[in-house]
Amino acid sequence: MPLALFSVNPNFPSRQVIDQETFERLLPLAHQWAKAQEQLILARGVPLGPRHIADAHRVGVQDCSRVKVLVVDRIPLPDNKELAEASRRTHIITDASRGATIGHGIIIRADCWGDRELILHQLVHVAQCERSGGLEPFVQKYLCDRRTCANFTVGSLEDEARRIAHEICAADAAASKNVSAHSPFAR
Ligand SMILES: [Zn+2]
């Protein structure tokens, strides 16, 4: 459970929950890992393009110019073995993750780059992090949020990201259908 990560995983509730003692021991490691990852993404990532800036505004991101996106072959797990294992077991980041957000840094797996809903989801996490007052409070809040859910299921922050991304995509799909239905060029 590390990290500030918010990944979009196939969500299978985990049966092995992290106990309180392990959670408290791993939390500082998760903070360090998240901080280092955010710095790396901000240093190597690219700024948002116009379409993603519009989406970022739409989900409430305040400082869009600070957001950077890094496209990778695989979402990185922490080097620390125990932290990596906890991350997998809780489905926060797994080998199947398609994207993750750490503060203003977004990592997207290369084969998912065209998935607008996935990017919207990550942008909601950026907005949540800004509202929390920064990376460290957000990591804490996110992990506690997930931890207090039964068996480390998704938690309210994850629910919000999934819901908003899905609603925006569904609304835009409905609107574009409507436009083409009324277009003089529609057949
Ligand atoms: Zn998420």
Image (cartoon, rainbow, N blue to C red):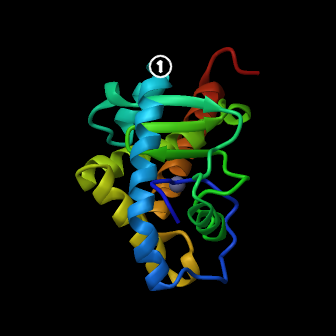
Quarter of the image where one finds residue 57: top left
Residue 77's place in the image compared with 62, above or below, is: below
The residue tagged 1 is 49
Picture coordinates of residue 77 (x, y %)?
61, 51
Picture coordinates of residue 59 (x, y %)?
38, 42
The C terminus sits in image quarter: top right
Circle 1: residue type: Gly
Report the front residue among 110 and 61.
110
Relative to 110, 127 lies left or right: left
Report the front residue among 95 and 180.
95
Residue at the farthest right position: 187
Picture coordinates of residue 75 (x, y %)?
64, 44
Whether residue 75 is visible, yes or no, is yes
Report the front residue among 54 and 66.
66
Residue 99's place in the image compared with 137, above or below, is: above
Picture coordinates of residue 50 (x, y %)?
44, 18
In this figure, what is the number of numbered marks? 1
> Is the residue indicated by label 1 positioned so its CB lies within 8 Å of ligand 1?
no
Which residue is located at x 47 percent, y 71 percent?
146
Which residue is located at x 44 percent, y 37 percent?
105
Which residue is located at x 60 percent, y 37 percent?
108
